[in-house]
Image (cartoon, rainbow, N blue to C red):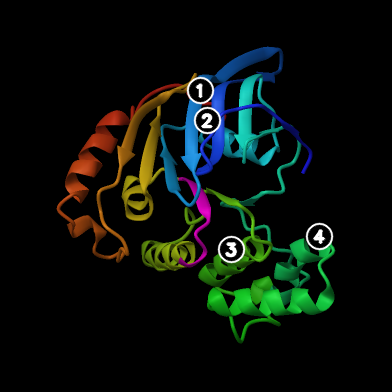
Amino acid sequence: MNMTTVNVARAASVAAQFQNVDKVYESRGHSFEVLRAFDLTVRDGEFLAVVGPSGSGKSTLLNLLSGLDGVTGGSVLCNGRIVDAVNTNVGYITQQDNLLPWLTVQQNISVPLEIRGVDPAERAQRVAAIIDKVGLKGFEHHHPSKLSGGMRKRAMLARTLVYEPQIILMDEPFGPLDAQLKLVMQAELLKLWSATGKTVIFVTHDIVEAITLADRVVVLSHRPSRIKLEEHIAIKRPREVHDVRFDPAFEEHYRRLWAAIEVHGAGGAD
């Protein structure tokens, strides 16, 4: 990973930081400002959910931390280093299904290890272990077209987890799923997160999903975005996704988060 080391005082528990970040997009001779003097710190092992209106820069934050896009001003840091190129310390799961259709589940999950030059024997061992962990054992030789929507999401998650990134970025990964399957995948994600201790930054429009999954939820304002609300979720773990909304703390969390989200406003880059 090509990053520039910076001299910053940071706690060992910090996984990522956005420091005084500005982001301006140019399109057809016009510019629009998505982030202005934006600050956010994400702790190691934290499950952080990001919610906010369309155009508030939720996906932009993930693109900046992954190194797929660059800041206009300020700094984005991962593990104390400025992100100035593609960040191989993160895994990125989007809403879109990007499994390679000509490869089997096993082959799809192997791709990032092949790119990293992992020894074939170790590669096979790690792929087999993660397939078992995400509940895809028996489907190793199936192509994506033969899998259900939930299985495809599990395969995408496995492909990210197999190379053990420090941070997992998730951009509305369960958005296209029906309500029942979404609950199943939320439960699977919580189980995997608990087992791995990874840092997760999870973008969603669904307040219930954010409360169900996260340690902390941040609400973004309309652009140029700032953090309107930082809500620490006082629902103890482990959590049963079906029962979270019956927890005494749920209603108060939901009320505060909903009140902080402005329903109307300008659109733009998410």
Residue type of the residue flagged with mark 4 = Arg
The residue wearing badge 4 is 116
Q: Is 153 left, or right, of 3 in this rendering?
A: left
N-terminal of the two: label 1 or label 4? 1
In the depicted structure, whether residue 154 falls above or below residue 32: below
Q: Residues within 10 Å of mark 3 (few under 14, many from 20)?
A: many
**3D distance between C-alphas at marks 1 and 3:** 29 Å
Determine the residue positioned at 72% across, 32% down. 5
Tell me which label, 2 or 1, sits earlier in the chain. 1
Q: Identify residue for label 3.
A: 157
Q: Please, what is the three-letter code of the amino acid marked with disc 1? A: Phe
Mark 3 residue element? helix
Q: Nearer the viewer, residue 112 or 264?
A: 112
Q: Residues within 10 Å of mark 4 (few under 14, many from 20)?
A: few
Task: Give the CA distance from mark 2 to mark 1.
Answer: 11 Å
Range of magenta residues: 195-203
Q: Is residue 198 magenta?
A: yes
Cα distance between the residues tagged 2 and 3 = 23 Å
Q: Nearer the viewer, mark 2 or mark 4?
A: 4
Q: Are marks 2 and 1 in contact (CB under 8 Å)?
A: yes
Q: Quadrant of residue 117?
A: bottom right
Q: Which residue is mark 2?
A: 57
What residue did someone put label 1 on?
Answer: 38
Q: Is residue 32 left or right of residue 40?
A: right
**Residue 52 percent across, percent down from the top left:** 41, 34
Q: Amino acid at mark 3?
A: Leu
Along the line of sight, which residue is nearer the eye, 163 or 70? 163
Indicate the quadrant where residue 123 lies. Answer: bottom right
Tell me whether the residue at label 2 lies in contact with that at label 3, contact meaning CB atoms closer than 8 angstroms: no
The alpha-carbon separation of the residues under discs 2 and 4 comes to 31 Å
